[in-house]
Amino acid sequence: MPPTDRPTGNVLIVGAGPTGLLLAGDLAAAGIGCTVLERRPEETTNLTRAFAVHARTLEMLDARGVAEELVATGTRVGRLRLLGSTALDLSRLPGRFPYVLVTPQYETERVLRERALSAGAQIVHGAEAVGLRQDAAGVDVDVRDAGGGTRTLRASYVVGADGVRSTVREALGLPFPGRAAVRSVMLADVRLDRAPADVLSVGAVGDAFAFLAPFGDGWYRVIAWNRRRQAPDSEPVDMDELREVARRALGTDLGMGEPRWTSRFHSDERQVPRYRVGRAFLAGDAAHVHSPAGGQGMNTGMQDAANLGWKLAAELRGWAPSWLLDSYHEERHPVGRLVLRRSGALLRFALAEPRSLRAARAAAAYAATHVPPVARRIAGAVSGIDLAYPAPRGSHPLTGRRAPDVPLAGDPGRLYELLADGRFVLVVAANDPAVTYLAAKRWAGRVHCAPAGGATRTTALVRPDGYIAWATDETAPDRRAAAIRDALSQWCGRPADRPAHEPRPSQTVVPGEDGTGKGTGR
């Protein structure tokens, strides 16, 4: 059957954290039937795991129309303090978000949940996935409700976004190899007698590490580690010990009061070998976990979801290229591996014990913040701005890279506003006749045609997740038009409409460069 733009199935998402909620919103906005299963009851909580929303994640939220709402809940940090007096300058990052946003994870979840529900997604609380089976046509997921009853739900695809103890991953029989990065980490939510000098406070002295982040309501999250005492996760947190560790690592405990909540945990470095098994996918902590250093966990999971959502929608609408769903693993697995290695190295660097290593750490931290090329690379890596996907040999240098939020002629006035409905965007020079002829008609509903707001010689096809699928600097009208047609066929499937009067591809009439419609046969 020819490709259509009508959904041919539905998706079950297991887990209503940031990863699952962003994916649910993307699918629902694309018109795909989507249900999120969450074992936790529906209730407001002040517990949170993550505080940092990095620049690239904010750009993705901007493309979904919710970045400004989230930014209003937190604090913008343009200089991210590392260790001691060194700080990473984020203010020179390209784009609209040259900072890291510090806001508790529950605010991110709230914004994403409201978007998903308003788009039509269903979120079912008190529903725990306990098993799954799949066949060539779909997936059956066994679900246990809060009362202990079990039912089976059928879907075209299932996505496990259910965390480090993922039921979906276990049901698929996938290993989760790795090791513990650090043990016996203490957590506490406290009030302070004195506010810290910085929004985020971090310090390490080899045998002690401490980190403070604000909730924004007078409470602070304290994360601390004590090399001298490695208690099991089940042991309660001793506040006297926590204060003493903070004084060693930060120089002060800032008058920590009694906690409203404490916990102890260990941080693992693990990654599943495959992100896709048939009709089942893994995303977020279900696919990869790593140290909290650099605040990468939640951001990496949300970017997994942004990569997967439009690909599932294209498949369920019947026009995805045959290789598209496999590209999720091919693109995101290397990213997860890279984040795991970087965050692990940063953690071990911070916890270095010998005096010689601590001196080397201080020297490297100085270079990272005072040598401009090094500082730019580190800022780009931490923020996610420099993330790129593999490109075929001989591709344009922009292929696979993040698309900047370029100005566009007309309304809306910039690229990321136009990405809001989940379509590709073909950005070309103003008055390029190939745009109307090739994209606006033959791939209607899948591609926006957008003249750039300024002078440009580059034609670029931007994916729905804000990465450049293809680009060319070709200026000859016939060759540029042919290249555009080939790129759209590769990424957007066969044309949705091939009118009877249209010439055969081998005899396509290409509009002339002067825009008159006259051209040469090809």
Image (tube, rainbow, N blue to C red):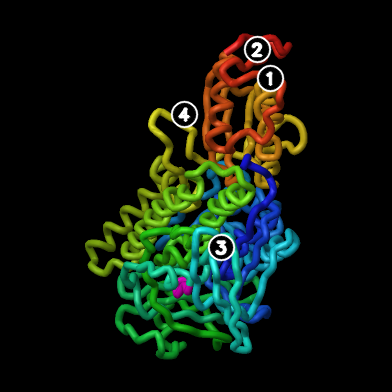
N-terminal of the pair, mark 3 or mark 4, is 3
N-terminal of the pair, mark 3 or mark 1, is 3
Circle nearer the viewer, 2 or 4: 2
Q: Are marks 4 and 1 in contact (CB under 8 Å)?
A: no
**What x and y, as percent, mark residue 411?**
77, 36
* Amino acid type assigned to the residue bearing label 3 in the image: Thr
Mark 2 Cα shell of 10 Å, populated few (<14), some (14-19), many (≥20): some
Mark-to-mark CA distance, 2 and 3 = 46 Å
**What x and y, as percent, mark residue 138?**
55, 62
**Secondary structure type for disc 1:** helix
* Amino acid type assigned to the residue bearing label 1 in the image: Pro
Mark-to-mark CA distance, 3 and 1 = 40 Å
* Amino acid type assigned to the residue bearing label 4 in the image: His
Residue closer to the observer: 86 or 184: 184
**What x and y, as percent, mark residue 312?**
57, 52
Q: Which residue is mark 1?
A: 433
N-terminal of the pair, mark 4 or mark 1, is 4
**Secondary structure type for disc 2:** loop
Residue closer to the observer: 73 or 180: 180
Mark-to-mark CA distance, 2 and 4 = 23 Å
| Residue 154 in view in this figure | yes
Residue closer to the observer: 471 or 264: 471
Splitting the image into 4 quarters, where does residue 24 fall? bottom right
Q: Which residue is mark 4?
A: 396
**Secondary structure type for disc 3:** helix
* Amino acid type assigned to the residue bearing label 2 in the image: Glu
**Secondary structure type for disc 4:** loop
Residue numbers of the magenta segment = 163-167
Q: Which residue is mark 2?
A: 513
Q: Which residue is mark 3?
A: 19
**Which residue corresponds to the image point at 46% horizontal and 58% vertical from the top-left?**
278
The C terminus, quarter of image: top right
